[in-house]
Structure formats: structure tokens, C-alpha cells
Amino acid sequence: MGLKQPQLIDRLTSFSLGNHRISNFEMETSAIYGMGKVLGHSCLSLSAIVANRISKTFSKDGGAAVENLIVKTLGIISGL
């Protein structure tokens, strides 16, 4: 079974509106926000960017980027 839209990533990364371009897209968060709305919850999503789809470059250490996001977020939350 093939992909329904195999060129989707290329089409999204080449799309622009004025000076704005899509440099990242994340699909799982939409489910979090959708379920949160249905259940009456407030939701928040934080992402560590580990790839630049426009330049086709990737983080050398994605795990470190995620770890940094977790540490920074916990530091902000603990200060509230």
C-alpha cells in the first residue's frame, strides 16, 4: 500500500505565503488539542526542533535537544 500523497512533504516545504514558509510540521499535537477540546481540558505542546526540512539538515544530537527542552521546561514550571 503506497502513500496517498507521496509528495506532501516536498509540497509543504516549498509552500510560502509572503515571507512566511513552513519549516516544521507536527501531526501528533493535533490529536492532543482535539481530545483536550472534547474533554474540556487546556493543553500545551512543546517541541524540540531536530530537523530543518527546507535545508534538509538534521540535528547531530536530537536526544540532547529533547533533554534541553525538558530541563528548561521543568525549570520554568518549578519557578511558577
Image (cartoon, rainbow, N blue to C red):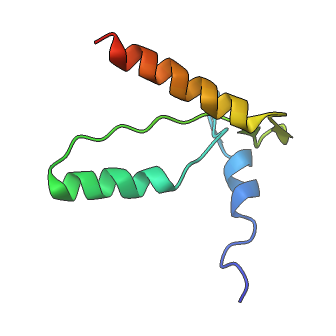
Residue 79, visible in the rendered structure? yes
Task: Identify the residue at image location x=22%, y=52%.
Answer: 37
47 left or right of 4 in image:
left
Q: Measured along the vertical axis of the image, is residue 22 above or below residue 20?
A: below
Any part of residue 18 in sight: no
Residue plotted at (62% across, 30% down) = 67
Image height check: is 79 above or below 35?
Answer: above
- How many numbered markers are drawn? 0
Please identify the residue farthest to the left as the structure is shown: 40
Please provide percent x and percent y for residue 19: 64, 27
Single out the residue that lies furthest toward the top: 79
Q: Residue at x 19, y 59 (%)?
A: 38
| Relative side of 75 to 4, left or right | left
- Position of the N terminus by quadrant: bottom right
* Picture coordinates of residue 35, whole percent (x, y): 28, 58
Residue 62: x and y in percent read 73, 37
Residue 20, image quadrant: top right
In terms of image quadrants, where is residue 49?
A: top right
Counting from the top left corner in percent of width and height, residue 16 is at 65, 40
